Image (cartoon, grey):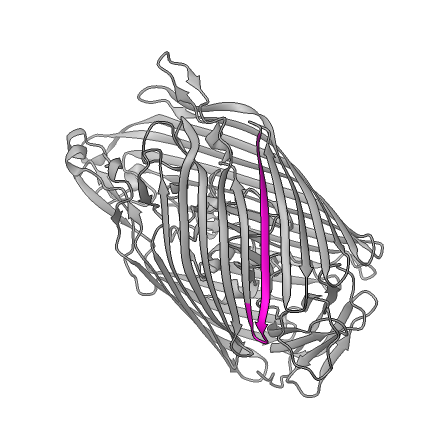
Amino acid sequence: MQAQSSTATQTVRGTVLDAAAKAPVIGATVVVLGVEPALGASTDVDGRFRLTGVPVGRIKLRISSVGYEDLLLNEVIVNAGKEVVLDFSLTERLTKLDEVQVVYKRSEDRNVTNNEMATVSARPFSPIEANRYAGALGDPARMAQNFAGISSANDSRNDIVVRGNSPASLLWRLDGVNIPNPNHYGAQGTTGGPVSMLNNNLLAKSDFLTGAFPAEYANALGSVFDLRLRKGNDEKREFLGQVGFNGVELGAEGPYSSKSKASYLVNYRYSLFSLLKAVGYEISGTPEYQDFTFKTDLPVGQRGNLSLWTLGGRSNITFLGKDVDSTQADVFGDENTNGRSRFTTGIAAASYEHRLSDRTVAKLTLSASRTTQEFNQDTIIYANGRRVLSETPNYDADFTQEKLSTNLSLTHKFSARDRVSAGVIVDLLQYKYASGYTFPERRIERDASGNTALSQLYVQWKHRFTDQLSLNAGANASRFELNGSTVVEPRLGLQYQVSAGSTVSLAYGLHSTLQPLLTYFYQTEQTDGSYVLTNKDLGFTRSHHLVLAYDRQLSDNLHLRVEGYHQWIFDAPVERTPSYFSQLTQGVDFGPTNKGNLVNEGTGRNYGLELTLERSFSHGYYFLLTGSLFESRYKGSDGVERNTPFNTQFVANALVGREFRVGSRGNTFTVSLKAATTGGRYVTPINLEASSSIRTAVYEYDRAFSVQQPNYFRADMKIGYKINRARLTHEIALDLQNVSANQNIFQQAYNPRTNAIGTAYQQGFLPVPFYRLTF
């Protein structure tokens, strides 16, 4: 797409590094394609470049250097209110090519991940996508729901199901640190929540991996979100104000002084609902939350960089039983109880990266995190007319988990053919758990405090036989000190470029994950009234991943990917006595597993076929079409193979966006449409007759997950208008969630008042306004 002339311009600058060695690429050329007069620049001794007078709008960049594969970026958005600062990595060629020879651009930025060791089932995540996709709400997890093989677990939360795995099987990583659940109202042992604490305005290009991932990722069974915080602008102070789904936020970034390349990045968000409460507007179930993110980068000499960052948030919510519609099932509340929840999460890290030579990079990261969760529940007794007669405390939970971590990694580039990396991660875990029922009788679930450790050691090797054939190999070893469980995990991937535009890849990985720490400290009451920790010896849940992928670049802007996969899961926790239960089914209720007498004897399998057809932005539009056919099954200790609750069997997504230029200043009007459909979830039927006799729900567990709900369908629409003015940009948008107002079933529950099974539905139609100002 040719950039049009405009009176508004901006600066585009950044750095170009060797992808393997992280050393500056000197003399690389960065050119803006399709503009007159021509715009271009070369990198200096530090790998830095600067382009001034770049027209506001969308531009296409080509980065090239002798001995390296070209890098193309089809869509770089340039706004008047903020400089564009980019970091590029170039891959060294193995053979010298004739200057006029045209080769497949393997380093197409949109299709290649940050992690060069990823062979299959890996996709880069762009903050631009999370901003523009209908229904994404600027949330990385909600944005990922558009990818093949991924579906939502609940419209009101951002938990995701990847290839039939439980939402709890996802690993979050931020700037190389394995972090706890980065979501408001994110219960310990879960990986999602209603509102993300991750700020999309602060993220850089990141990776999302869904199977057979590299050896550096451990304690992950289903998927990995490997996110990166961007650096603050080190030359110019810039500011941001925003109002949207995540709240009201203010941000700033810039250099500490004009003489220093040290920079900072800071952002604070406050819930809109909290503001409404401050002016006297409050109802039951009003969410209150706030979060804070800070990062600073400090150059140390010519070869070192010190980075410090912190992310913290707190949230609370109250559900009062008297406010629940007694004739309907409710997603969150129960007419017979009051519930009060409070959550806090804090993460801080300091990392120092040093280029020991032009071929060797070392990085040391020290980090700490703390999460707390408090929950109190009352039993309500009503008089006539639903007048509250009494409220009796019946359940309390107070969970605290802390972690101190050391991450040390070393990467060495032997040549253009060989690169090796190795690392060690040590997590020191401290915990304090207390929970139990107080009414009608005292029963303790958890009462434990102490500390333990998880250690991980990995090594990875990338070998390029030719420009067409490459190998990724590695291994990871992990040890859990609580019970001495130890695992060793090999990883292997091969990639072959069949022709100028097509690639075939094959990868295998043995993956393992611990149970949520809360699971180990669930107490089982004995006949003499004592309590025993019957889960403390649980080991890792393990699985073999095998993935075959085919990639085809159909044209400059059109990309096709087909992946087939099979996942064999073993050593999953199940009950010692024969039953339907398996830890593989957890994640539906978004709470900890309250089961004792668990042993690692369960199995499962997930297999399927995925297709992605994607058109990157060009000539004013883009689209993303994804489809998946799969099966997700498991066996409990009764030996019966059943559907997991996540076995929807198919997922299909269609996303399309169109952009229109308005005027000559780079203003744009955008429209984004999304449609998603999946098969229905499998649920356990309720025995209405038995429930009626005792006035409480009785489930037919011998038929667990045998009844399929109706298919799910949802359509979203987002419209936006961007106004560029001298040195500032306004962005206004309206995200129309579930624009078709489709009633998708969330759950069904027995209601003793009506003596019937009621249905709670997923989110209805919800318009979400958005405004952002950058200057």
User: Magenta part mainly helix, strand or loop?
Assistant: strand
Number of marks in picture: 0
Measured as percent of width and height from the top left, residue 26 is found at 81, 69
Q: Is residue 216 left or right of residue 315?
A: right
Q: Is residue 448 left or right of residue 351?
A: left
Q: Residue at x 49, y 41 (%)?
A: 542
Residue 495 is a magenta residue:
yes
Q: Is residue 91 left or right of residue 498?
A: right
Looking at the image, the residue that sits furthest to the front is 465
The answer to which image quadrant residue 238 occupies is bottom right
The answer to which image quadrant residue 727 occupies is bottom right
| Magenta segment boundaries in residue numbering | 485-503
Measured as percent of width and height from the top left, residue 371 is found at 55, 37
Toward the viewer: 322 or 758? 758
The answer to which image quadrant residue 22 occupies is bottom right
Residue 139 visible (yes or no): no
Toward the viewer: 254 or 309? 309
In the rendered image, the vertical position of residue 202 relative to residue 319, given as above or below: below
Residue 14 visible (yes or no): yes
Could you tell me which quadrant the C terminus lies in? bottom right
Could you tell me which quadrant the N terminus lies in? bottom right
In the rendered image, the vertical position of residue 677 relative to residue 53, given as above or below: above
Measured as percent of width and height from the top left, residue 333 is found at 32, 41
Toward the viewer: 119 or 227? 119
In the rendered image, the vertical position of residue 497 relative to residue 334, given as above or below: below
Looking at the image, the residue that sits furthest to the top is 528
Q: Residue at x 41, y 40 (%)?
A: 603
Measured as percent of width and height from the top left, residue 728 is found at 62, 71
Q: Residue at x 43, y 30 (%)?
A: 599
